[in-house]
Image (tube, helix red, strand yellow):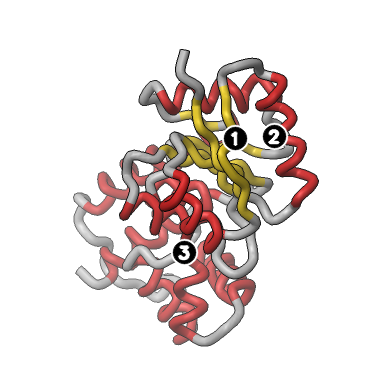
Amino acid sequence: MEKIRVLLVDDHLLFRQGVASILQRAGERFHIVGEASDGVQAQTLARTLKPDVILLDVQMPNCDGLQAARAIAAKLPEIKIVMLTVSEREEDLFEAIKAGARGYLLKTTASTQEITTALENVMAGQVMLTPIMATKLVSEFAAIARAQKNEALPRAPESADAPHLTEREREVLNWVAQGKTNKEIATELHVAENTVRAHLRNILDKLQVHNRTQAAAFARRDHA
């Protein structure tokens, strides 16, 4: 059996060493072709080493895993990407999938067997998600379906009880409706990402919706 050639990308040396040890103990199935500590190095090594699969962290200095995944998938689509991260944020999951990742595993829950199985299954053409993240993804798809259904309904008339958003909250909502991430919105508005999250929480409360997809649907109806 031909070995699966793996590139490890994580800014913590000890973690890379731990994953390397896991793959080495898995027998003859895996060959670690290189290691990188940030997204810039990951892109360079992906071009020169041409691994079969990259195990990629999300939060790293210089260039994070999502940026690296987008760049690698655009230029080297044959390389499979699996995110291995502590981030349970739905936003990171969705951005990873949009960036071309074929897997999303959590460092806090993934077992040795889950990591090795994920690499093998991704190479076989499957998509591998940690159960908790798969649940989030299914929930989001259900929310999108409900939002699309609601968009087809007649628009409710304006009333005195309509939610009042501040000018900044309307700006944030407008960017959300355009599909921007919190990080992208923060850049557009020249504020901290935490500030955007706080605005978004207020927006969800005022609109009485559960997630950004439903808020975006509200914004589109409001401008219909």
Look at discs 3 and 2 and give the one toward the viewer. Answer: 2
Residue at label 2? 20
Assess whether mark 2 and mark 1 are in contact (beta carbons under 8 angstroms).
yes
Give me the residue at 56% from left, 46% from top.
56
Q: Residues within 10 Å of mark 1 (few under 14, many from 20)?
A: some
Whole-percent x, y for residue 221 in the image = 26, 64
Residue situated furthest right in the rendering: 14
Separation of disc 1 and disc 3 at Cα?
Answer: 49 Å
Assess whether mark 3 and mark 1 are in contact (beta carbons under 8 angstroms).
no
Judge by depth and name the residue closer to the eye, 76 or 59: 76
Residue 139 in sight from this viewpoint: no
Whole-percent x, y for residue 22 in the image = 71, 27
Judge by depth and name the residue closer to the eye, 168 or 90: 90
Q: Residues within 10 Å of mark 3 (few under 14, many from 20)?
A: some
Above or below, 154 against 187 in this view is above
Whole-percent x, y for residue 144 in the image = 35, 46
Q: Secondary structure at mark 1?
A: strand
Give me the residue at 40% from left, 67% from top.
180
Q: Earlier in the sequence, mark 1 or mark 2?
A: 2
Judge from the rendering whether residue 69 lies leftward or rightward of residue 223; answer left or right: right
Judge from the rendering whether residue 125 lies leftward or rightward of residue 190; answer left or right: left
Q: Secondary structure at mark 3?
A: helix
Residue at label 1? 32
Assess whether mark 2 and mark 3 are in contact (beta carbons under 8 angstroms).
no
Q: Earlier in the sequence, mark 3 or mark 2?
A: 2
Judge by depth and name the residue closer to the eye, 81 or 192: 81
Whole-percent x, y for residue 108 in the image = 73, 38
Residue at label 3? 207
Specify the amino acid type for callout 1.
Ile
Give me the residue at 44% from left, 34% from top.
52
